[in-house]
Amino acid sequence: MLDNQGVQHPTQKFIVKELAVHVVVGKNECACLLFQPPCGWNELSTKYQRTNEWIINNHHGTAWEIGFIPYDDVQDAIARITKGVTIIFANGLQKRQWLQSYTE
C-alpha cells in the first residue's frame, strides 16, 4: 500500500512531500519518507505560494521546507521501496498517475 501527500508546482502538477508505504507481503515493513522541496519557496509564483499555503495549512500540514531526502532522489526511493513488489495499491487517480510516472 502506498499513500502520498504533496503540493503543487508550476512545472510539475504534483510534488510529493510525504510518501508512506506499507509492504504487506513478505517484508511486512512500513516507511514514511519526507522529501525536500524541488526549489525554494520564493522561486514559486504568488499563485503557487497561495495554493500551497492552503494545502499545507488545511490538508497535510507538511511545510514546504520540511524534508530529509533530496527531491532528485524520489525515483531511487520509489525503486527501492517497490523492488520485488508486483501489486501496489494507491488511493485516487492523481496518486496512481503520479506513481505510474515513476514505476513504468
Image (tube, rainbow, N blue to C red):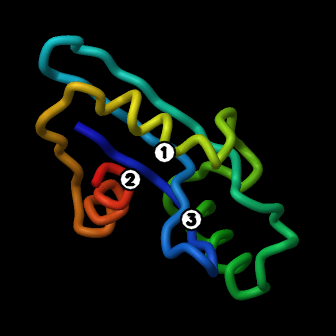
* Discs 3/1, front: 1
Which quadrant of the figure has residue 80? top left
Q: Residue furthest right?
A: 42
Mark 2–mark 1 contact, CB under 8 Å? yes
* Discs 2/3, front: 2
Name the residue: 69% across, 33% down.
68
Residue flagged by tag 2: what amino acid is it?
Answer: Tyr
39 in relation to 69, above or below: below
Name the residue: 52% across, 33% down.
33
Q: What is the spatial separation of the Cα atoms under label 3 and label 1, in whole angstroms? A: 17 Å
Residue underneath mark 3: 7
Q: Earlier in the sequence, mark 3 or mark 1?
A: 3
Q: SS for tag 1?
A: helix
Name the residue: 23% across, 68% down.
93
- Quarter of the image where the N terminus is located: top left
Residue 79: percent from the left, percent from the top? 39, 36
Residue 66: percent from the left, percent from the top? 72, 43
Which quadrant of the figure has residue 34? top right
Q: Residue furthest bottom?
A: 47
Residue underneath mark 2: 102
Name the residue: 34% across, 32% down.
21
25 in relation to 99, above or below: above
88 in relation to 51, above or below: above
Binning the other alpha carbons within 10 Å of mark 1 as few (below 14), some (14 to 19) or many (20 upward) gives few
Q: SS for tag 3?
A: strand
> Which of the numbered marks, if any, corresponds to residue 75?
1
Q: What is the spatial separation of the Cα atoms under label 2 and label 3, in whole angstroms? A: 17 Å
Is 72 placed left or right of 30 in the picture?
right
- Quarter of the image where the C terminus is located: bottom left
Mark 2–mark 3 contact, CB under 8 Å? no
Q: What is the spatial separation of the Cα atoms under label 2 and label 1, in whole angstroms? A: 6 Å
Residue flagged by tag 1: what amino acid is it?
Answer: Gln
